[in-house]
């Protein structure tokens, strides 16, 4: 009886255990199913026979499929057939890819996406007991975010054009393709780079403001796109990029042909772009007139790499801007030689200014005299450079433009100002003025007035003896700021002269608007003034106007007695030129000034003395 009771108890406990296990299994299955259905990813599990074991309800919608065929036991081939009916969605491409890799032993992940639409990430994993598992994840938002980040990294945010990084990447890829093309250089396809720089863009920014400048750049980008060629589908075949500021580059594919034919294609597009950017721009009711210069470089004649081509096109652009804007210019090897020369000058000039403390930058002086008495009234300070390894002295024409382009003109101008003022203090005549040229770059310096005041204080020069010479270009670039700076300097007691009058726009309005003490008439009007009535009439008119405005006139470039007599008759009060003296070193200046001040020196004579001309 006891045994029967024990046996019955064991049966009951076993039944309860089986029931508990069944309940746990059912609960576990429900929890697993709930977890499976709660996943954001779609899941498929197939057995070793490629039959569906598990599929959650998220998988089919992610692929754009109807859920009916996705029941356990469905062969993968049937699911594949159902997915093939989806011609435009992602199901077909994803299932075809899974068909290829199903049953393989290596895990794999891939992404399928629609153009400007959904993106699905698929992960395939083989299972140890046979079969395989596939998960599907909608990464559209992440994919779009990554696509946007890639776009921003490759494009200019203002214009939407490609930026420098994307241009160089595409350029390198295309050059690699070109190198693999036909072996005959004369017949293979080619590529041209067109480097554009806008003319007068700074004036738009300064006068209309930066928002107008941004609007202008967007319109420029649109016009450049319109100026490019189009393929059969209407999309541009060529690429345009904004490198920054007002610089743009067009990458132009050229068909197979001779070098002359490729140059013709590049020239045609260059002319089209120049014409497109010459037309007026409407900036919210304000009309802006700009223009462009285009530098062109051809592969592989002007460079074999992306960097070499871009540099060659940039050199051609620089050459085009310096020789006359509003045109296209092809790269020539001589331009590279000129660029190397300018870099050498920049390096040596920087060393002379900042390492050698300007010891080799000498300040010479050329006297200015009263036109009738020939007595000296002042001296113009002129810089000369004793370059290491060079014979003689280097004239400013060799390095001033490099100094202005690189910003070294600021330090150079301050060096000349200090030397000139320090020398003028030692002159015997305590009233004789010293004239120092200022470039537009120097004049735009915020601390110019303070620096001039400090130099005057350090040298002890009477401010009334210092005269600063400026050119018309300075007044054109920023008249309001220039006038304000001139007023502040004049408050120190400093005077002003308008240099090279007649070489720029020669607007007589400048004479009335700006506080000049003297106007220097350019040597171009003096050279043949004694034989050309027109030049004499111009000098006479300018002298009369300046006289009415209380300004003196100085005729530059006087070399003969005939020239001097004619400018005196035209009303010029002062003169400067080799007839009196060339620029001389400070240690010779005292003798030259004494000779000019002597009565015998004021007797008429023809031509400059040979020793002075050599100086």
Image (cartoon, helix red, strand yellow):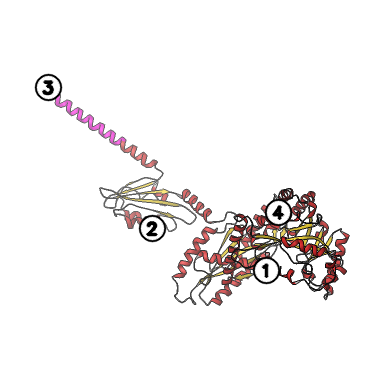
Q: CA distance from mark 2 to mark 4?
A: 85 Å
Measured from the top left, where is residue 148 in percent x and y? 51, 52
Instruction: Choose top left, top right, bottom left or bottom right for residue 39.
Output: top left
Q: Is residue 449 above or below residue 599?
A: above
Q: CA distance from mark 2 to mark 1?
A: 64 Å
Residue for badge 3: 2
- The earlier-in-sequence mark between 2 and 3 is 3
Q: Residue 458: in sight, yes or no?
A: yes
Q: Dot 2 surroundings within 10 Å: few (below 14), some, or many (20 or more)?
A: some
- The earlier-in-sequence mark between 1 and 4 is 1
Q: Secondary structure at mark 1?
A: loop
- Dominant SS of magenta comes to helix
Q: Residue at x 50, y 75 (%)?
A: 256
- The earlier-in-sequence mark between 2 and 4 is 2
Disc tally is: 4
Residue for badge 4: 418
Left or right, 601 with respect to 245, comes to right
- The earlier-in-sequence mark between 3 and 1 is 3
Measured from the top left, where is residue 193 in percent x and y? 55, 67
Q: Secondary structure at mark 3?
A: helix
Q: Quadrant of the N terminus?
A: top left
Q: Nearer the viewer, mark 3 or mark 1?
A: 1
Residue for badge 2: 84
Q: Residue at x 87, y 58 (%)?
A: 550
Q: CA distance from mark 3 to mark 4?
A: 126 Å
Residue 324 numbered mark, or none: 1
- The earlier-in-sequence mark between 3 and 4 is 3
């Amino acid at each position: 009886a006891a045994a029967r009771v024990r046996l019955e108890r064991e049966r009951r406990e076993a039944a309860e255990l089986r029931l508990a296990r069944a309940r746990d299994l059912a609960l576990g299955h429900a929890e697993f199913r709930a977890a499976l259905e709660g996943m954001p990813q779609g899941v498929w599990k197939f057995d070793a026979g490629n039959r569906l074991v598990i599929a959650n309800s998220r998988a089919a919608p992610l692929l754009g499929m109807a859920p009916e065929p996705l029941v356990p036991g469905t062969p993968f081939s049937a699911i594949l057939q159902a997915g093939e009916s989806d011609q435009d969605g992602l199901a077909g491409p994803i299932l075809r890819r899974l068909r290829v890799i199903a049953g393989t032993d290596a895990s794999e992940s891939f992404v399928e996406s629609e153009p400007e639409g959904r993106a699905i990430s698929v992960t395939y994993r083989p299972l140890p007991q046979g079969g395989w598992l596939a998960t599907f994840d909608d990464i559209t938002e992440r994919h779009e975010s990554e696509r946007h980040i890639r776009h921003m990294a490759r494009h200019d945010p203002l214009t939407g054009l490609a930026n420098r990084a994307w241009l160089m990447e595409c350029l390198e890829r295309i050059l690699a393709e070109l190198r693999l093309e036909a072996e005959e250089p004369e017949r293979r396809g080619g590529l041209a780079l067109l480097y554009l720089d806008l003319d007068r863009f700074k004036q738009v920014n300064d006068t209309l403001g930066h928002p107008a400048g941004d609007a202008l750049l967007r319109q420029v980008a649109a016009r450049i796109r319109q100026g490019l060629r189009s393929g059969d589908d209407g999309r541009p075949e060529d690429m345009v990029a904004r490198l920054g500021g007002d610089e743009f580059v067009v990458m132009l594919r050229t068909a197979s042909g001779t070098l002359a034919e490729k140059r013709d294609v590049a020239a045609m597009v260059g002319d089209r772009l120049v014409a497109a950017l010459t037309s007026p721009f409407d900036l919210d009711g304000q009309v802006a007139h700009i223009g462009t210069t285009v530098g062109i470089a051809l592969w592989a004649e002007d460079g074999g790499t992306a960097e070499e081509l871009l540099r060659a096109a940039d050199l051609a652009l620089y050459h085009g801007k310096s020789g006359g804007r509003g045109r296209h210019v092809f790269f020539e090897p001589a331009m590279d030689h000129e660029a190397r020369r300018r870099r050498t000058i920049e390096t040596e000039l920087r060393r002379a200014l900042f390492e050698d403390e300007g010891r080799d930058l000498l300040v010479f002086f050329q006297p200015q005299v009263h036109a009738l008495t020939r007595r000296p009234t002042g001296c113009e300070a002129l810089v000369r450079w004793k370059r290491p390894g060079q014979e003689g002295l280097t004239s400013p024409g060799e390095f001033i433009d490099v100094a202005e382009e690189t910003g070294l003109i600021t330090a150079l101008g301050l060096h000349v100002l200090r030397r000139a003022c320090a020398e003028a203090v030692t002159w015997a005549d305590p009233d004789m003025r010293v004239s120092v040229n200022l470039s537009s770059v120097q004049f735009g310096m915020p601390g110019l007035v303070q620096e001039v005041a400090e130099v005057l204080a350090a040298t002890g020069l009477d401010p009334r003896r210092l005269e600063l010479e400026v050119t018309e270009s300075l007044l054109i670039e920023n008249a309001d700021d220039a006038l304000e700076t001139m007023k502040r300097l004049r408050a120190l007691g400093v005077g002003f002269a308008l240099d090279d009058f007649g070489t720029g726009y020669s607007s007589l309005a400048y004479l009335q608007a700006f506080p000049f003490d003297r106007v220097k008439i350019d040597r171009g009007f003096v050279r043949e003034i004694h034989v050309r009535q027109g030049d004499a009439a111009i000098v006479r008119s300018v002298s009369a106007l300046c006289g009415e405005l209380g300004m003196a006139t100085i005729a530059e470039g006087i070399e003969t007695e005939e020239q001097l007599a004619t400018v005196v008759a035209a009303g010029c009060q002062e003169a400067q030129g080799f007839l009196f003296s060339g620029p001389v070193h400070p240690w010779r200046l005292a003798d030259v000034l004494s000779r000019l001040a002597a009565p015998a020196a004021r007797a008429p004579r023809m031509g400059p003395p040979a020793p002075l001309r050599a100086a």
